[in-house]
Image (cartoon, helix red, strand yellow):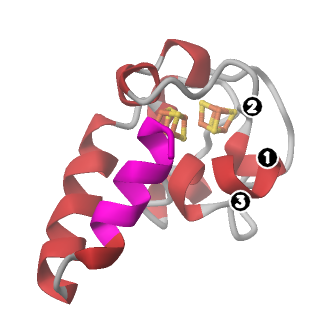
Amino acid sequence: MDKFEQLIHNVMDMSESDQKKAVASYKDSCICQTCASYNECASDANEKLFCVNGKSVDCITVLRGCECPTCPFAQSLDIGVINNTYCLNGGELEQR
Ligand code: SF4
Ligand code: SF4
Protein backbone atom coordinates (compact mmCIF):
# COMPACT_ATOMS: atom_id res chain seq x y z
CA MET A 1 0.00 0.00 0.00
CA ASP A 2 1.52 3.37 -0.97
CA LYS A 3 1.19 6.67 0.96
CA PHE A 4 -1.97 7.79 -0.86
CA GLU A 5 -3.71 4.43 -0.43
CA GLN A 6 -2.69 4.46 3.25
CA LEU A 7 -4.24 7.90 3.75
CA ILE A 8 -7.52 6.82 2.13
CA HIS A 9 -7.49 3.65 4.23
CA ASN A 10 -6.92 5.68 7.43
CA VAL A 11 -9.74 8.10 6.57
CA MET A 12 -12.14 5.23 5.88
CA ASP A 13 -11.38 3.87 9.36
CA MET A 14 -12.32 7.17 11.07
CA SER A 15 -15.66 8.08 12.58
CA GLU A 16 -17.90 10.21 10.35
CA SER A 17 -17.10 13.40 12.26
CA ASP A 18 -13.35 12.74 12.15
CA GLN A 19 -13.63 12.02 8.42
CA LYS A 20 -15.27 15.42 7.92
CA LYS A 21 -12.52 17.14 9.92
CA ALA A 22 -9.78 15.32 8.02
CA VAL A 23 -11.30 16.12 4.61
CA ALA A 24 -11.77 19.77 5.63
CA SER A 25 -8.10 20.03 6.61
CA TYR A 26 -6.97 18.38 3.35
CA LYS A 27 -9.23 20.79 1.45
CA ASP A 28 -7.52 23.69 3.22
CA SER A 29 -4.16 22.51 1.89
CA CYS A 30 -5.46 22.04 -1.69
CA ILE A 31 -4.03 24.71 -4.03
CA CYS A 32 -6.60 24.35 -6.85
CA GLN A 33 -7.75 27.93 -6.30
CA THR A 34 -4.36 29.07 -7.69
CA CYS A 35 -4.92 27.15 -10.94
CA ALA A 36 -6.06 28.76 -14.20
CA SER A 37 -8.54 25.91 -14.72
CA TYR A 38 -10.28 26.66 -11.42
CA ASN A 39 -13.32 28.91 -11.76
CA GLU A 40 -15.97 30.80 -9.82
CA CYS A 41 -18.47 27.95 -10.10
CA ALA A 42 -16.03 25.57 -8.41
CA SER A 43 -15.22 28.17 -5.77
CA ASP A 44 -18.90 28.86 -5.02
CA ALA A 45 -19.53 25.11 -4.68
CA ASN A 46 -16.37 24.71 -2.52
CA GLU A 47 -15.19 22.02 -4.95
CA LYS A 48 -11.57 21.10 -4.13
CA LEU A 49 -9.43 18.07 -3.34
CA PHE A 50 -10.31 16.43 -6.66
CA CYS A 51 -7.45 13.93 -6.20
CA VAL A 52 -9.52 12.37 -3.40
CA ASN A 53 -13.08 13.41 -4.28
CA GLY A 54 -12.92 12.81 -8.03
CA LYS A 55 -14.01 14.99 -10.95
CA SER A 56 -15.60 18.41 -10.70
CA VAL A 57 -19.32 17.76 -10.76
CA ASP A 58 -20.11 20.27 -13.50
CA CYS A 59 -18.01 23.38 -12.85
CA ILE A 60 -14.57 22.77 -14.39
CA THR A 61 -14.86 21.81 -18.05
CA VAL A 62 -11.81 23.39 -19.73
CA LEU A 63 -8.15 22.63 -18.98
CA ARG A 64 -6.11 25.81 -18.65
CA GLY A 65 -3.24 24.32 -16.63
CA CYS A 66 -2.84 22.14 -13.55
CA GLU A 67 -1.01 22.95 -10.32
CA CYS A 68 -1.31 19.45 -8.86
CA PRO A 69 2.35 18.55 -9.56
CA THR A 70 3.46 21.42 -7.29
CA CYS A 71 0.83 20.86 -4.58
CA PRO A 72 2.35 20.18 -1.13
CA PHE A 73 -0.48 17.76 -0.25
CA ALA A 74 0.20 15.79 -3.45
CA GLN A 75 3.97 15.90 -2.94
CA SER A 76 3.61 14.63 0.62
CA LEU A 77 1.79 11.58 -0.77
CA ASP A 78 3.93 11.07 -3.90
CA ILE A 79 1.04 11.80 -6.29
CA GLY A 80 0.26 14.56 -8.79
CA VAL A 81 3.04 13.99 -11.32
CA ILE A 82 2.11 10.84 -13.26
CA ASN A 83 -1.61 11.43 -12.67
CA ASN A 84 -3.08 14.92 -12.23
CA THR A 85 -5.79 17.18 -13.71
CA TYR A 86 -8.02 15.40 -11.22
CA CYS A 87 -10.93 17.83 -11.69
CA LEU A 88 -11.36 16.69 -15.28
CA ASN A 89 -9.84 13.20 -15.34
CA GLY A 90 -11.03 11.78 -12.02
CA GLY A 91 -9.35 11.08 -8.69
CA GLU A 92 -5.95 9.45 -8.16
CA LEU A 93 -7.34 5.95 -7.58
CA GLU A 94 -9.71 6.30 -10.55
CA GLN A 95 -6.83 7.25 -12.85
CA ARG A 96 -4.60 4.32 -11.85
S1 SF4 B 1 -3.26 17.34 -5.85
FE1 SF4 B 1 -4.53 18.85 -6.94
S2 SF4 B 1 -6.63 18.33 -6.38
FE2 SF4 B 1 -5.29 17.30 -4.91
S3 SF4 B 1 -5.12 18.70 -3.17
FE3 SF4 B 1 -3.43 19.16 -4.55
S4 SF4 B 1 -4.11 20.80 -5.91
FE4 SF4 B 1 -5.92 19.89 -4.92
S1 SF4 C 1 -7.14 19.43 -10.22
FE1 SF4 C 1 -5.37 20.33 -11.26
S2 SF4 C 1 -6.33 21.17 -13.16
FE2 SF4 C 1 -7.97 20.84 -11.72
S3 SF4 C 1 -8.23 22.82 -10.67
FE3 SF4 C 1 -6.90 21.51 -9.40
S4 SF4 C 1 -4.84 22.14 -9.99
FE4 SF4 C 1 -6.21 22.82 -11.63
Q: Secondary structure at mark 1?
A: loop
Residue located at (58% from left, 25% from top): 68
Residue that mark 3 sits on? 55
Q: Nearer the viewer, mark 3 or mark 1?
A: 1
- What's the CA distance linking mark 1 and mark 2? 8 Å
- What amino acid is labelled 2 in the image? Asn
The circle drawn on residue 7 is none
Give the quarter of the image for residue 17: bottom left
Q: Main secondary structure of the magenta part?
A: helix
Residue that mark 2 sits on? 83
Residue that mark 1 sits on? 96
Ligand 2, by image quadrant, is top right
Q: Earlier in the sequence, mark 2 or mark 3?
A: 3
Question: Is residue 72 depicted above or below 48 in this figure?
Answer: above
| Dot 2 alpha-carbon crowd within 10 angstroms: few under 14, some 14 to 19, many 20 or more | some
Mark 3 CB lies closer than 8 A to ligand 2: no
Q: State yes or no: discs 1 and 2 in contact (Cβ < 8 Å).
A: yes
